[in-house]
Amino acid sequence: MENKKVLIVEDDRAIIKPIVLLLGKKGISTLTAANAEEGLLLAYQNAPDLILLDILMPKIDGFMMLEKLKSDEKTKNIPVFIISNLGSDEKIKRGMELGAKKYFIKTNWSLADIVKSVEEELASRS
């Protein structure tokens, strides 16, 4: 997993910190953004191998960021995993239709499960 980079776009530091630690233990480097505007900038500048994206954030939401990522030639092929508290079928459907590869509802998944999915996705793209 050396040289792999994951961008985490999440405004809750309590969620970011353990994900960064777990990915770091796997040799995966991370970039973090506290809102979608910052996340877009980092995605364009750094071309991460995968993006973990929250939906509810200040300024613009994760759905808007996902739309922008998938409509840009530079970032459209980066896999995006949504990690959100929004778990309605409608929200999940919207995220998947906009191009998310996976949709994790925070209360239903452990961080270890999410990290395992990240590892599997990165390994499949090597």
Image (cartoon, grey):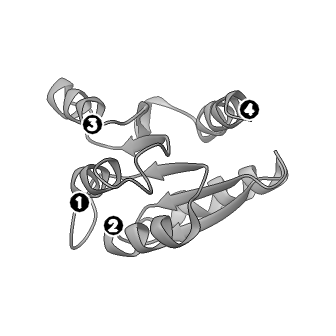
| Mark earlier in primary sequence (3, 1) | 1
Which numbered marker is on residue 123?
Answer: 4
Residue 86 percent across, percent down from the top left = 26, 40
Instruction: Point out the frontmost of discs 4 and 1.
Output: 4
Label 1: state its secondary structure.
Answer: loop
Mark 4 vs mark 3: in front: 4
In the rendered structure, which disc, 3 or 2, sits on the residue that comes first in sequence?
2
Q: Residue at x 61, y 49 (%)?
A: 49
The residue under label 1 is 61
**Neighbour tally class for label 4: few under 14, some 14-19, many 20 plus, Cα within 10 Å:** few
| Percent of width and height locating residue 51 | 50, 51
Secondary structure type for disc 3: helix
Find residue 112 and report its image quarter: top right
Q: Amino acid at mark 3?
A: Gly
Q: CA distance from mark 4 to mark 1?
A: 29 Å
Q: Nearer the viewer, mark 4 or mark 2?
A: 4
Instruction: Give the residue at x 63% y 53%.
Output: 19
CA gap, disc 4 and disc 3: 23 Å
Q: Earlier in the sequence, mark 4 or mark 2?
A: 2
- The residue singled out by tag 2 in the image is 36
